[in-house]
Amino acid sequence: MPARISLRRSLAAIAALPLLTLAACGYGSESTDNDTTEVAAGAEKIDGLDSVRIGYFGNLTHATALVGREQGIFQDELGATKPEYSTFNAGPSEIEALNSGSIDIGWIGPSPAINGFTQSGGKNLRIISGSASGGVKLVVNPDKIKTLDDIKGKKIATPQLGNTQDIAFLNWIKEQGWKVDAESGKGDVSVVRTENSVAPDAYKSGSIDGAWVPEPTASKLVAEGAKVLLDEASLWPDEKFVITNIIVSQKFLTEHPAAVEAVLRAAVKTNTWINENPDEAKASANAQLEADTGKPLPAEVLDPAWESIQITNDPLASTLNTQADHAVQAGLLEEPELTGIYDLTLLNKVLAAEGEATVEDAGLGVSS
């Protein structure tokens, strides 16, 4: 890691696709250029590229992108090639940007990655690394819901029909022996599809009794008086499941592997720094959120949200496969062919060079 990093201080519609929708809470993106990182003297361009276009969401579950940008680590590894950033509010718009060539590499959740891969017949993207695990909770109105059994008959929000959290909640409902029509959300539990941005207001108005949502929305609801009833991590082996991956355009990966390797090297170094300096990293992520959105997260939201997210290089491939199975069982996804969705070759090269353990693709890699 560059020595300066440790010294630096931070400023304090469902998509029209068959069956399974692509995840999130809005559509559209915004190109942002608030970086002041300077190119090191004598640095050279990677693969002769003027720029590498990187996409991410303004979510703490995309902390690698937030911190790597704010700390200048992507620029350090890309030399004289400029990282150009676009922020997104939803999986569909980021996949569209990747397909159109507006971005080359992106941070994204598992459901849109699965859809982007399957809807293109396996031709448009690869998952090349993990980024984050966890950070999803069932939060409820404690006056109405005391136990998990009390969920029956209540109105619980998820971000969007068919998104990652919606599928997880539908699967949990099924495991309780309750019945819900996946498309309408009607049944023993009322599943109310509510954008993350409006969920706190919906909770305050009483139109929902709780929500199965990612961070920081879960902690925003807690700040409004909700209580955490269940952390989704407790339902997974070793309490780990993929919430964010890194994807790349197959065309860009084929034509510019050195640039992809440089971004992965930056991601791995960023993850190491985050895990070794959690407080500074939390401040860095929040500083970038403020730069992107004009508003930082308050401490009562930031602190619990940050603690529930695990930053990791491992894509946790077996859990992505399980999430796809849950979507199939809910009737929201046709049986997908996911072989080839992963290409972890460059990641494992970087990990080995950094003295880190390599990771597996659960038999879903290009050479599996």
Image: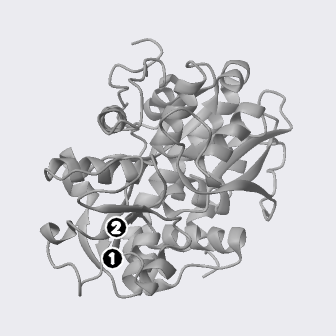
Asked whether 2 or 46 is in front, the reply is 46
Q: Which three-letter amino acid code belongs to the residue tagged 2? A: Ile
Side (left or right) of 250 relative to 269: right
Residue 41 in sight: yes
At a point 82% along the width and 36% down the height, the residue shown is 44
Q: Position of residue 251 (x, y in %)?
A: 70, 21
Task: Give me the residue at 48% from left, 58% from top.
Answer: 61
Closest to the observer, 200 or 334: 334
Task: Give residue 320's mark.
Answer: none
Q: Identify the residue under disc 2.
A: 156
Q: Is 315 above or below relative to 208? A: above
Going by the numbered disc 1, the residue's amino acid type is: Asp
Q: Earlier in the sequence, mark 1 or mark 2?
A: 2
Q: Position of residue 281 (x, y in %)?
A: 51, 67
Residue matched to label 1 = 209
Who is closer to the viewer here, 35 or 305?
A: 305
Expressed as whole percent of the image width and height from the top left, the position of residue 131 reads 47, 47
Residue drawn at point x = 41 percent, y = 59 percent: 275
Rounded to the nearest angstrom, the CA distance separating label 1 from label 2 is 6 Å
Q: Secondary structure at mark 2?
A: strand
The crowd level at tag 2 (other Cα within 10 Å; few <14, some 14-19, many 20+) is many
Decide: is 120 above or below 232: above
The percent position of residue 69, horizontal first and vertical second, equals: 66, 57
Residues at marks 1 and 2 touching, judged by CB atoms closer than 8 Å:
yes
Q: Callout 1: helix, strand or loop?
A: loop
- Considering every residue shown, the one lying at the far top of the view is 367
- In the displayed structure, 309 sits above or below 140; it is above
Quarter of the picture holding the C terminus: top left
Q: Using the rendered image of the protein, determine whether residue 132 is visible from the camera's viewpoint.
A: no
Q: Residues within 10 Å of mark 1 (few under 14, many from 20)?
A: many
Q: Residue at x 27, y 71 (%)?
A: 154
Quadrant in the picture for residue 47: top right
